[in-house]
Image (cartoon, rainbow, N blue to C red):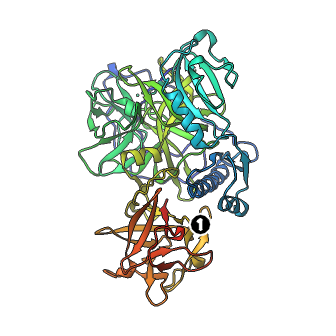
Amino acid sequence: MTVLGLFARHRRPRPALGWVVPVVALGALGPIAAPAAAASPPEPQARTVSDPVPAGFASWDQLFSLQTSMNATVRQVRRLAGLEKVSGYAGAVASPTARRVEIFWNGKVPEPVRDFAARSKIPVDIKAAPYSKVELEAAAKVVTDQMGRSTGTGRITEVSAAPNGTGLQVQVAGAPRVAGMKLAAGPVARPAILSKVKVPVDVEVVADAPQSLSGRWDTQSHAGAYMRNMAGPFGAGSCSTAFSIGDGKAFTARHCFPAPDTRKTVYSGTGGRFADLASGPVTSGSTTMDAAVIESGNPNFFEPTMWRGASASFRDGSGQTVWQVTDWAMAETGNIVSTSGAASGELRNIEVGRKVLQYEAKDAAGNDVRFGPAWKAKQVNGTAAAGRGDSGGPVFTPDLRRGGVTALGIISAGDVPVACPEANPNGRFCGSTLRFVDIQDASAALRQPIMLRAEDGRVRFEMRSPIDSPASQLPTSGEHNDLMSANNGYEADLEGGNTTAGTEVQAARGEAENPNNDWIFRDKGNGMWEIETAHGGGMVIDHNPDTHRTHLVHSQANNTNQLWSFQGVGDGWNQLQNGSGGCLTADKEGDGLGVWACDANNDGQKWRVG
């Protein structure tokens, strides 16, 4: 396999290509300085991209609308799975072409999960799994301890857990004579060094390890722009920028900066310095997450925007458009996504597969580095999913409701060599298989919120902890979250979506994409928080001291009945203590949330935000 390089690009707004989604127009970006002729690669020929819509869908809009609802359904199941101390959840598949969500579970399925599946607007099939996600990740630890060691047919370069809970998949690289061969799952055919793994192992042998994708041009304030970490000839140390996180910062790939961070400055295609590396490596044991933060000296430099369309090699900006980043989400197995790296431009119809726990790839200096976690995805028709110079660039889907794009991840590495999309690739590597870091994993690990453009045109910041993390982190002020109790997964729900003062806040079964379960947490200082309904109007959850129930009231300064503090009670749960005394309590479905004497053993008083 060959690592894909990253290329940034310079683009000007142009009519969008491909999916019919409203373009959010931006002002002209101004003239772009041409690089010296000696540094320029041959100009590729223009190309027309046409992606047929999968069977059964009238348009790409229809497919992505369904996929968004399916992902919200999986998210709710994961949250309910968190009610168990030891969850039997194994994984999920949310393929829009199947039109059904598949949930895989080891053992007895909890009643809240079964109830939600029965009520879901999206059909949900719950299937038995021989192993849980927790069991497979424990087995994977045995494999990752052997990463880089020879198996007799090559060295282990990747390990992932099957989303259906059937076992592990291990990739072995470095044996061209048996590339493409698959060894049968089970203990008989597996390499001897995997003999201690107690679950089925599917071993895939490939010619070489995944390659980091590092590339192109001039306007770097939008995701998908060209960057390089040395001021040398064209292509040297080239990568792409990813999504803005505000305050003059943006994401990119960690491998674009070779250890020990000797080249921290990044330049545009025309050689202008625009940012510096601003984060250290995020490691877990011997594994590094392939995500990093770059920072400009100008706090307003990076915008909540992204390049789409043709690559940066089209120096006149033809075929390139700027889109607002209006939402972000976690990818799911079976999803259809797109990449927009600087070198390759926009590449689509890429299907997400397994979540890879660890994989080995080379950094910008050619050093073997163990990365993880990341999603593994492949282009459905076997064409390019990303190429050299795209590393660090954005992975996304259209946000149909808001007319922008949804941020999903950061391009990391690729393999399975195929032709690049441009007519004259000049020796550039492209691959049909891709690894990308989930945007939510990067946000949580680097403690950085995602910068988004709200529907009213204002900028907002959002940050969420990974759904399957038990940690009881506090919310980020201003972010949207559901509020779920440990009592059957009942959520804080605004009855009927009524924002009139005095409307009861009740305990209800959670539903995917239900705005009545959506709350905005606002930090009021001194450890106290306001909880405002996402319906707007400045209405917050208030403790009625006469009834000791909760209702909506306009936000009032220094009203202790409207202030809540988080008190950890273990296993990722918090009590929400009211400023006037007592703890928020979900008693039974349909009843108003109470504010009763605090009891750390009462499941109705244990809450998680997410």
Name the residue: 59% across, 62% down: 513
Tell me if 298 is positioned left or right of 536 in this view: left
Give the vertical position of 287 relative to 605 (above or below): above
The location of residue 189, given as percent across then percent down, is 67, 18
- Label 1 environment density (alpha carbons within 10 Å; few <14, some 14–19, many ≥20): few
Name the residue: 31% across, 29% down: 229
Tell me if 287 is positioned left or right of 515 in this view: left
Q: Can residue 348 be seen from the camera position used here?
A: no
Which secondary structure lies at badge 1?
Answer: loop
Looking at the rendered structure, the kind of residue marked 1 is Asn
| Closest to the observer, 375 or 388 | 375
The location of residue 505, given as percent across then percent down, is 53, 78
The location of residue 212, given as percent across then percent down, is 45, 26
| Closest to the observer, 210 or 56 | 210
Q: Which residue is mark 1?
A: 514
The location of residue 226, given as percent across then percent down, is 38, 34
Q: Can residue 227 be seen from the camera position used here?
A: yes
Residue at the extreme right: 56
Give the vertical position of 295 relative to 458 (above or below): above
